Image: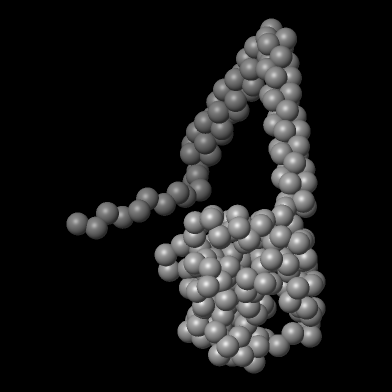
Amino acid sequence: MVRRRRRWRRPRGATEVAAAGAVALAAAVVFFQAAEAGARAAARHWPVLAGLSGVAIAGAAVWWVRRRAAGRARAERLAALRLSLAGIDGLGDQEFEFALRDLPVRDGWSARKAGQQGDQAADVIGQHTALGRIVLQAKHTKVGAKVGSQVMYQVKGTAGPAHGADIAVVVTNGSFTRDAKAWGDKHAVHWVDRDRLRLWAENGVALHDLLRLPARASRRGLGRPAA
């Protein structure tokens, strides 16, 4: 059986209007009595309330100061960040991705680690005011191993369409095959091999200087989806 929804209607007749007015008056009296009681309680206990407010304000101030200090300390650490190739070779895959997150931050980008299962060839995603959005694909490997063209194809296919990137970069502590480098140069997929990684991580050359990245407005597209 379908239940009908009850609808409110306006009072009709003098009796219903008077009843509605009485209910409204009673509600107003209760409200003002409660407000008056609350004001009297606050007046009696204002030292306690003031103390609690002071503690809350002081706690918030301490939290804010500590957060700012931690942020400055992290910025100072990253500004001086240098990672040796020997140290990078000893990292695990996840640690390598975190290193590739911190290095762009040192260079003036905002960056976050994104690599996980189903990451669609994006281990780090960063943003720069003038240069745009960047996707980094990390390939930590044994020294002497080479990254092939297949990785370049995958990054090219997802950097723009899946992540909205202006710039795609594959980074390895090893090297790239000749075909991979040639294909990347032709199709705007940048590569950072062992020699370039030394300049970036160990010598402190900024990534955008290392790769000679142009401003976003003058860059070839990566097949980004329409806005």
The front one of 152 and 37 is 152
- Up-down relation of residue 126 to residue 75 (above or below): below
- Regarding residue 64, the answer to whether it shows in the image is no
| Residue in the picture at 78% in, 78% down | 212
Residue 158 x %, y %: 53, 79
| Residue 156 relative to residue 39: left or right | left
| Residue in the picture at 64% in, 17% down | 38
The way the protein has been coloured in the rendering is: one colour
- Up-down relation of residue 191 to residue 59 (above or below): below
The extreme left residue here reads 1
| Residue 93 relative to residue 191: left or right | left
The front one of 69 and 203 is 203
| Residue 43 relative to residue 152: left or right | right
Q: Which quadrant is home to the C terminus? A: bottom right
Residue 223 x %, y %: 60, 86
The extreme top residue here reads 44
Q: Quadrant of residue 193?
A: bottom right
| Residue 21 relative to residue 76: left or right | left
Q: How many marks?
A: 0
Residue 44 x %, y %: 69, 7
Residue 213 x %, y %: 76, 78
| Residue in the picture at 51% in, 77% down | 146
Q: Which quadrant is home to the N terminus? A: bottom left
| Residue in the picture at 49% in, 56% down | 92
